[in-house]
């Protein structure tokens, strides 16, 4: 499973850049939305790491993610795409190179190269990690990075870069069991269950993968999983409290 992250969060508004009424976090999320579709189509299991930068790193570590990819947009008056990895991480450098080289082929923006910096999500995550700054919000890049087509193209390129890093077209996934939910609220208790059982947590889109047993949290998740898995453990109550009680009953 890989960890993905739309840079920033509602609560860290101090770091969120705004240009012409558009927030960086919203651009990051737009790309991540397309990236999730690309990954799901290729059967790559992912978890979207949500929260503060420390929470994001903790989620990736708790789920034993094989890699971590953080998507950002830049500011400060430059132009182009640049990709970061942690200093002295050779695997991080390999991952950054795999993704960066694909993105600059399609972004149409200046290639600013691959750089090293001790961003928290790069230093606190235990797996090879990279942070990509797709373009600048306060330069001519802006007209491009707000386009849906640009976001979709870059998401496709990031996915190809991930596949190239692993050296496969499609990551073969065959898990015995997993936890699944389709929303971020239930994902919090889902991450607790996944940690206790030592099995992956899948959030939002149900990827194309094979698994014998799924712990489905919430009614939507139960409905989506029925018929697709041999065993569906239905963890859904009449409200969130009852659902949470059922999840705790599995621990
Ligand atoms: Zn950022």
Image (cartoon, helix red, strand yellow):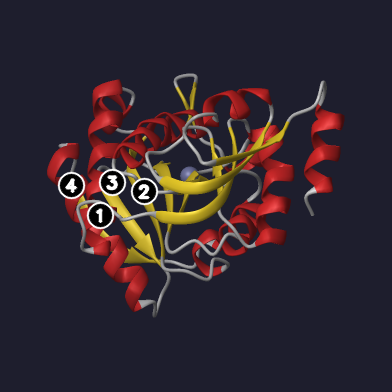
Q: CA distance from mark 3 to mark 1?
A: 6 Å
Residue 236, horizontal then vertical, whole percent: 74, 29
Q: CA distance from mark 4 to mark 2?
A: 22 Å
Quadrant where the image shows the N terminus: bottom left
Contact flag, marks 4 and 3 (Cβ < 8 Å): no
Q: Quadrant of the rendered structure where residue 63 is?
A: bottom right
Residue with the mark numbered 4: 104
Near mark 1 (Cα within 10 A), the count class, few <14, some 14-19 or many ≥20, is some
Q: Dot 3: what SS?
A: helix
Contact flag, marks 3 and 1 (Cβ < 8 Å): yes
Q: Dot 1: what SS?
A: helix
Q: Is residue 10 positioned above or below 57 on the image? A: above
Q: Identify the residue shown where x is 55% and y is 52%.
A: 177
Residue with the mark numbered 2: 44
The one of 64 and 77 positioned closer to us in this rendering: 64
Q: Is residue 196 positioned above or below 182 on the image? A: below
Contact flag, marks 4 and 2 (Cβ < 8 Å): no
The one of 136 and 209 positioned closer to us in this rendering: 209
């Amino acid at each position: 499973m890989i960890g993905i992250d739309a840079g920033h969060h509602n609560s860290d508004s101090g770091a969120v850049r705004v240009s012409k009424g558009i927030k960086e976090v919203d651009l990051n999320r737009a790309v991540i939305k397309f990236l999730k579709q690309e990954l799901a189509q290729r059967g790559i299991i992912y978890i979207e790491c949500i929260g503060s930068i420390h929470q994001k790193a903790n989620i990736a570590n708790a789920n034993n993610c094989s890699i971590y990819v953080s998507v950002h947009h830049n500011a400060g008056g430059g132009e182009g795409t640049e990709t970061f990895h942690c200093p002295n991480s050779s695997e991080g450098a390999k991952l950054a190179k795999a993704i960066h080289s694909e993105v600059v082929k399609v972004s149409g923006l200046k290639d600013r190269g691959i750089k090293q910096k001790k961003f928290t999500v790069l230093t606190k995550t235990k797996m090879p990690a990279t942070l990509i700054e797709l373009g600048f919000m306060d330069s001519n890049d802006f007209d491009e990075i707000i386009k849906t087509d640009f976001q979709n193209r870059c998401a496709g390129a990031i996915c190809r870069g991930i596949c190239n890093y692993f050296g496969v077209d499609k990551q073969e996934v065959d898990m015995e069991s997993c936890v699944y939910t389709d929303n971020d609220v239930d994902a919090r208790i889902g991450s607790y269950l996944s940690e206790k059982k030592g099995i992956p947590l899948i959030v939002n889109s149900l990827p194309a993968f094979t698994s014998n047993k799924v712990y489905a949290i919430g009614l939507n998740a139960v409905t989506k999983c029925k018929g697709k898995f041999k065993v569906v453990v239905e963890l859904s109550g009449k409200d969130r409290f009852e659902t949470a009680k059922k999840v705790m009953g599995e621990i």
